[in-house]
Image (spheres, helix red, strand yellow):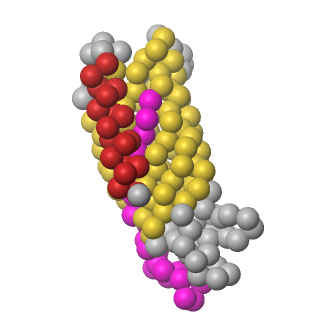
Amino acid sequence: MLKRYLLGAFFSVAVLTNASAQTVSVNAGPELLHSFNHDPAFWGAGITAQGEIWVKERLGLGLNTGFLRFASTRPLIPTGTVTYNAIPVLAVIKYPLPVIKNLYGQDAMGYTFATDVHYRNNGGNVPGGFTYYFSLGYVFAKHFDMAVKVGRSRFDKKDRPANVNEHNLGLKLAYVF
């Protein structure tokens, strides 16, 4: 089921790239995240890709997806795991900020699928949860995009907190195709 969602997300990015060469942008690159919600903190690393269509001069709409692996030196609970995976599938709203040329803000929201994440109470698997990120980015040298992002993947369902850190601060360096 997870593979089906990823395939659909990448297919959507491919469709976006074929829409119009002047209004479509695709970028991909490594991402590093650090959680600041719990002790111990988790570090995450992975790769994300994003496709966007500029529907107006000051409004871009798109899709962001990728694969992120989080790890810590010790688990949050004694029987918990020290690693987990997150696969975000997010809708994106992107807008240039008039402060500096090539500076932009971006809101991304959607769902993050999780693997190796377990409820504290009963050890059951957590399927994932709603995700929101705000990014502040800058495009430089025409083909490079650097963004700082902050947000959260909501993995806790019905007051049963998962043994993961949800609040993240991240840095992404992407190549713009």
Position of residue 80 measured from the top left corner of the image (x, y, whole percent): 53, 83
Position of residue 122 measured from the top left corner of the image (x, y, whole percent): 64, 82
The correct choice, above or below, for 141 with respect to 4 in the image is above
Position of residue 27 measured from the top left corner of the image (x, y, whole percent): 31, 34
In this rendering, does residue 174 appear at all?
no
| Closest to the observer, 62 or 168 | 62
Task: Say whether residue 150 is left or right of residue 89.
Answer: right
- On-image quarter of the N terminus: bottom left
- Of all residues, the one furthest to the bottom in this rendering is 78
Q: Quadrant of residue 15?
A: top left
Does residue 69 show up magenta in the picture? yes
Position of residue 6 measured from the top left corner of the image (x, y, whole percent): 37, 49
Task: Say whether residue 15 is left or right of residue 100.
Answer: left
Task: Say whether residue 36 is left or right of residue 142.
Answer: right
Q: How many marks?
A: 0
| Closest to the observer, 158 or 167 | 158
Q: Quadrant of residue 28?
A: top left
Task: Say whether residue 83 is left or right of residue 3.
Answer: right
Q: Who's the residue at 50% across and 68% down the image?
A: 42
The correct choice, above or below, for 149 with respect to 83 in the image is above
Q: Who's the residue at 42% across and 40% down the image?
A: 64
In this rendering, does residue 168 appear at all?
yes
Q: Who's the residue at 46% across and 73% down the image?
A: 116
The correct choice, above or below, for 20 with respect to 161 in the image is above
The correct choice, above or below, for 129 with respect to 58 in the image is below
- On-image quarter of the C terminus: top left
The magenta stretch is 62-83
Q: Who's the residue at 29% across and 32% down the image?
A: 14
